[in-house]
Image (cartoon, grey):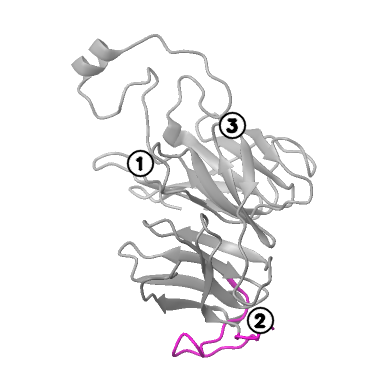
């Protein structure tokens, strides 16, 4: 995951997650540093287990709350005594140093402070295993809401209230749930979701619940797996997992897990009619 707060002349970094470790990678020096947290057994507040998705705050603020990028004179003039805060926005740290981590096996969402190397429990739901997540592009204030997939459900999580609510959707064949894993979102607010056990990719309007099967699977909903390139109506996948929308939103890159391939899906608009 590339840090969206990268600046010219500064540290350009990305974060990589393995099963239970997050690595910070400096793209200027190729230095890879593990973000080690307090070790412990499964379920310990500082132990991550089966990390799927991560999100990082897309905007940074200085320790005094002023915007980054101003001259030192401007910052000094605008500086205010830092106010104590709770939760993921700690005084003395940039918002850009806060990761939201989908801690799947522990069935929880945690915030991770990159500089302090500790985790804070943000949310936990019994029986819910958060997988991949994507920021909600429709919020007027950045980083206040994101969507995450959990089994057959998609939830919208509010980072200010630390509460979530389900997205009510049904697949084209009438099914209400379907092992969704990967998520991304277009600038118009349409979710793209990979369906692991139905071997398909769907578009979901989170506001109306309308859905459309973009490719893979089959029209009967039985979830036929296989490997076939070609037209979206006949292409086949085998357990599609992570997906990433291209910057120009013309295509989606999909990890086709059991076919051991990365697939490219060309998009045609509108993705959903309603």
- Magenta stretch containing residue 120, yes or no? no
- Mark 2 = which residue? 221
Q: Position of residue 151 (x, y in %)?
A: 69, 61
Report which quarter residue 267 is drawn in.
bottom left
The mark found on residue 5 in the picture is: 1
SS type, badge 3 = loop
- Mark 3 = which residue? 161
Quote the CA–CA distance across marks 2 and 1.
41 Å
Q: Is residue 51 above or below residue 274?
A: above
Question: How many other residues sit within 10 Å of disc 3, few (<14), some (14-19) or many (≥20)?
Answer: few
Quote the CA–CA distance across marks 3 and 2.
37 Å
Q: Is residue 186 above or below residue 64?
A: below
Q: Does residue 33 appear anywhere in the picture?
A: no
Earlier along the polypeptide chain: callout 2 or callout 1? 1
SS type, badge 1 = loop
Quote the CA–CA distance across marks 1 and 3.
24 Å
Foreground mark, 1 or 3, reads 3
Q: Position of residue 9 (x, y in %)?
A: 24, 40
Residue at position x 51%, y 27% in the image = 89
Earlier along the polypeptide chain: callout 3 or callout 2? 3
Question: How many other residues sit within 10 Å of disc 2, few (<14), some (14-19) or many (≥20)?
Answer: some
Earlier along the polypeptide chain: callout 1 or callout 3? 1
Magenta region, residue range: 218-240
């Amino acid at each position: 995951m590339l840090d969206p707060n990268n600046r010219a002349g500064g540290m350009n970094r990305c974060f990589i997650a393995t099963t239970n470790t997050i690595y910070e990678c400096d793209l200027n020096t190729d230095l890879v540093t593990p973000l080690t947290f307090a070790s412990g057994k499964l379920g310990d507040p500082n132990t991550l287990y089966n990390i799927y998705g991560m999100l990082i705050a897309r905007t940074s603020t200085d320790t005094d709350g002023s915007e980054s990028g101003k001259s030192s004179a401007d910052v000094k003039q605008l500086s205010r005594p830092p106010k104590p805060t709770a939760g993921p926005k700690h005084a003395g740290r940039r918002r850009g140093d806060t990761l939201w981590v989908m801690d799947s096996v522990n069935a929880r969402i945690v915030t991770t402070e990159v500089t302090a190397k500790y985790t804070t429990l943000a949310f936990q739901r019994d029986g819910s295993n958060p997988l991949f997540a994507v920021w909600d592009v429709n919020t007027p204030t950045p980083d206040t809401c994101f969507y995450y997939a959990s089994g057959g459900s998609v939830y919208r999580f509010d980072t200010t209230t630390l509460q979530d609510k389900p997205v009510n959707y049904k697949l084209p064949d009438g099914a209400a749930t379907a092992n969704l894993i990967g998520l991304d979102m277009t600038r118009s607010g349409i979710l793209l979701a990979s369906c692991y056990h139905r071997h398909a990719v769907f578009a979901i309007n989170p506001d109306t619940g309308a859905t459309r099967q973009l490719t893979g699977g089959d029209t009967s909903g039985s979830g036929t797996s296989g490997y076939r390139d070609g037209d979206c109506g006949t292409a086949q996948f085998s357990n599609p997992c992570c997906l990433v929308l291209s910057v120009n939103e013309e295509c989606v890159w999909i990890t086709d897990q059991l076919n051991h391939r990365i697939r490219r899906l060309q998009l045609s608009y509108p993705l959903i009619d309603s």
